[in-house]
Image (cartoon, rainbow, N blue to C red):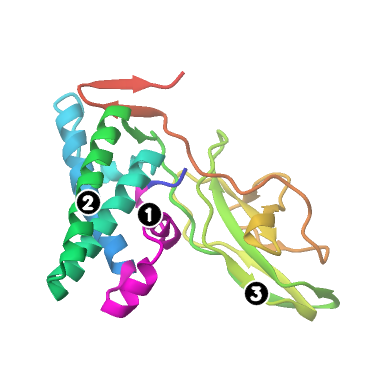
Amino acid sequence: MALFNDGPISSLEDLRVYETSLLDTASIEGVSLANKLDLAGQELGGEILRFLIQQLEPAESIGPGKLDQVVATDPLRRWHALRTLAIFFRDVHHNQLNDRYRAKWNAYEAEAKSAARLLWEVGVGTVRNPLRRPMPPVLEILSTDDEYPQLLFKTTWVTGNGAESAASGATLFAGGIGLKPQLTVNNPPQRATGWNIYAGVTEATLSRQTPSPLPLNEVWVMLGNQPVSGSSVPDGQAPDQYVRLQRLLFRG
């Protein structure tokens, strides 16, 4: 799973599961959904940090950096999506004073509070050694005699004990005759010992291109003109532990 600080916890598509006409409403009202996703993440971060302080101190000193260890589990993603929708309809109601928007604001606010209670009961998942999601890989174009298809590339960080981060955003290679992709990565986290590369014609067909992780400073050059078949893109790190109300439960 991705980490809480890897980026937006839920996507526009996650929001549309609850509100199919959301994009049309946002366009009509001139409201940025991206900004609301970010705002909801900031609000959740403060509430999660307060919860961890209440549950873990004084045995463990908790600061803002603890959020780096929090995993975006399914209950957390649901809470984020519902909080985003509550914020969105709260704002458009204040703009228009429309009773229909007020009803939606109240409904999503109630559902968000319910989702938060579920998260506290299920537990906030954390990892001991977090690996942040990489930035998209840096693409350079080499000359070749072959023709390459249009491709998407994603990367992950790995550690010596086999942990693997969530995948980066995609880098697009346009393809064509005489064009060959070469990729590098930047700013590895301290715990990373290598990186993996995933390639495919579409998001659904992305597969790992490296039989073993590449050294951090190594350049990857695509050899054949078609992606090789490998494992699919990972979800990221699973929680090592769950912090629940009044107790700490360990996996395994």
Return the disc, 1 or 3, that comes first in the chain's sequence.
Answer: 1
Closer to the camera in the image, 90 or 149: 90
- Report if the CB atoms under discs 1 and 3 are less than 8 Å apart: no
Count the numbered circles shown.
3
Give the amino acid at mark 2: Ala
Q: Which residue has dot 1 on it?
A: 18
Q: Which residue has dot 2 on it?
A: 107
**In the image, residue 18 above or below residue 186:** above
Residue farthest to the front, as pictured: 100
> Which residue sits at x=60%, y=64%?
184
Q: CA distance from mark 1 to mark 3?
A: 40 Å
Q: Is residue 73 visible?
A: no
Secondary element type, mark 3:
strand
> Which residue sits at x=21%, y=42%?
113
The verdict on residue 247 being magenta is no
Q: Which residue has dot 3 on it?
A: 140
| Few, some or many residues within 10 Å of mark 3 (<14, 14–19, 20+) | few
Give the amino acid at mark 3: Glu
The verdict on residue 7 being magenta is yes
Per the rendered image, the range of residues in magenta is 4-33
**Residue 130, quarter of the rendered image:** top left
| Few, some or many residues within 10 Å of mark 2 (<14, 14–19, 20+) | some
Q: Is residue 163 left or right of residue 140?
A: left
Q: Position of residue 109 (x, y in %)?
A: 20, 50
Secondary element type, mark 1:
helix
Q: Is residue 88 left or right of residue 97?
A: right
Closer to the camera in the image, 199 or 21: 21
Q: Position of residue 13 (x, y in %)?
A: 45, 60
Closer to the camera in the image, 38 or 88: 88
| Few, some or many residues within 10 Å of mark 1 (<14, 14–19, 20+) | few
